[in-house]
């Protein structure tokens, strides 16, 4: 009874006072800041992962701020992000039947983080036939401004597999000068070049990371190949069939005119933009078994321009014809003295332009990356090319060609 009395007596004290009813103050709503959402590929506990595997993060609400990959001994695996951040690419192929763990952290603008890990095991060494790749870009050389990064494939890459292969081809330039890849129609070669010729002094680093890459379901990539070289001084050659003269330009200035004798009508020289591919102080042209061939001749100061056997070389036997008539089997004949001098001026990667002959240079017969316009060139890419990537305005100073090193040995077709 006493408890009831106290309660009733206290009731007027609660109801009295101001005539307006007071409501309790609302507590501020606490805003929940979400953490980034993150998933990884390869997924956790994956097996039979290709040796060319990359760690691919899928993140929303943040960006990747840390990636750490270790092998099954705890050794750190070096990896580099793709330019668009879509994947982390190990700098060397993974080892067969080894286990790797990747820990990836994503951070939101708020500072909240999410870390995910994935552990996966690579496949055994493949027994599938390999595609043999050849990187025609050697390490520690000096090349011409027309030097395309060229990779050859045997057997050729089928059209359906070219995008997968192209994703594993990496080029960086310093200072930056972005470019694009373009495939020869039959898939036997792919070229990388910028819209304009390389700037002198540019350093170019290449990686063809094809080791263990599944190619078309029936083949596997053979190796990882890397090289870093630079672009040197300016040299360009211009050969006009109408005048039977070669113009040699350095730094954009004419330094010599050289009389030439080109291919006769039955074996004409090709017209188009070529690149010096190889240089020989001495070599032998052996065309036995070749169409329009059947001869063996020793030559000096030979510079290869095509796979089909078109060279610039010393030809003392045709000096009286040089500057007047064409008598060769498709090569550019010059005097021994001029050939010796030219060898000291040019290097691999210089642009050589021929005009006015009876036939056009065929795509893929040599390093023909410059024999098409940029708009035609990018159509050969198996992946999208940025729409804003294109040549400099026509008013800009002309790009200059330079000298270079010696590439990987090439097929042995010869001309004369």
Image (tube, rainbow, N blue to C red):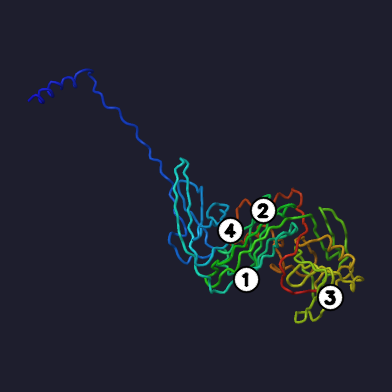
Q: Quick one: quadrant of the C terminus?
A: bottom right
Q: CA distance from mark 2 to mark 1?
A: 26 Å
Q: Which mark is residue 132?
A: 1
Q: Which residue is mark 2?
A: 173
Position of 105 with respect to 416 (left or right) is left
State whether residue 10 is above or below residue 90: above
Q: Position of residue 276 (x, y in %)?
A: 76, 64
Q: Quadrant of residue 186?
A: bottom right
Q: Quadrant of residue 317?
A: bottom right
Q: Residue at x 47, y 64 (%)?
A: 121
Q: Which mark is residue 265?
A: none
Q: Residue at x 47, y 49 (%)?
A: 105
Q: Are marks 4 and 1 in contact (CB under 8 Å)?
A: no
Q: Which residue is mark 4?
A: 91
Q: Position of residue 371 (x, y in %)?
A: 72, 62
Q: Of 141 and 312, which appears nearest the observer?
A: 141
């Amino acid at each position: 009874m006493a408890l009831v009395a106290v309660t009733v007596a206290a009731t007027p004290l609660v109801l009295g006072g101001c005539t307006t009813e007071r409501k309790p103050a609302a507590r501020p709503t606490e805003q929940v800041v979400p953490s980034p959402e993150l998933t990884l590929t390869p997924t956790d506990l994956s097996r039979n992962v290709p040796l060319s595997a990359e760690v691919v993060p899928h993140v929303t609400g943040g960006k990747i701020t840390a990636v750490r990959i270790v092998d099954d001994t705890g050794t750190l695996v070096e990896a580099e992000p793709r330019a668009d951040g879509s994947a982390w690419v190990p700098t060397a192929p993974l080892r067969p039947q080894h286990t790797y763990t990747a820990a990836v952290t994503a951070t939101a603008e708020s500072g909240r983080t999410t870390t995910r890990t994935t552990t996966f095991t690579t496949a055994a060494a493949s027994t599938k036939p390999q595609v043999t790749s050849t990187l025609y870009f050697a390490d520690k050389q000096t090349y011409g401004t027309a030097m395309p990064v060229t990779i050859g494939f045997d057997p050729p890459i089928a059209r359906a597999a070219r995008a997968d292969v192209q994703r594993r081809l990496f080029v960086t330039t310093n200072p930056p000068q972005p470019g694009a890849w373009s495939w020869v129609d039959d898939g036997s070669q792919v070229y990388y070049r910028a819209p304009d010729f390389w700037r002198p002094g540019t350093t170019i680093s290449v990686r063809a990371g094809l080791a263990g890459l599944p190619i078309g379901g029936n083949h596997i990539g053979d190796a990882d190949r890397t090289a870093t070289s630079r672009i040197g001084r300016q040299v360009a050659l211009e050969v006009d069939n109408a005048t039977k003269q070669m113009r040699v330009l350095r730094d954009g200035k004419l330094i010599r005119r050289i009389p030439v004798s080109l291919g006769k009508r039955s074996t004409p020289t090709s017209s188009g933009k070529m690149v010096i591919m190889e240089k020989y102080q001495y070599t032998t042209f052996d065309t036995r078994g070749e169409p329009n061939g059947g001869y063996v001749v020793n030559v000096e100061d030979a510079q290869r321009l095509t796979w089909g056997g078109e060279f610039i070389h010393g030809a003392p036997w045709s000096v009286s014809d040089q500057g007047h008539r064409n008598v060769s089997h498709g090569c550019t004949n010059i005097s021994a003295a001029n050939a010796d001098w030219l060898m000291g001026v040019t290097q691999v990667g210089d642009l050589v332009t021929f005009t006015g002959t009876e036939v056009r240079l065929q795509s893929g017969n040599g390093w023909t990356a410059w024999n098409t316009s940029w708009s035609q060139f990018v159509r050969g890419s198996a992946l999208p090319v940025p729409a804003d990537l294109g040549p400099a305005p026509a008013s800009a100073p002309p790009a200059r060609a330079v000298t270079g090193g010696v590439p990987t040995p090439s097929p042995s077709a010869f001309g004369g």
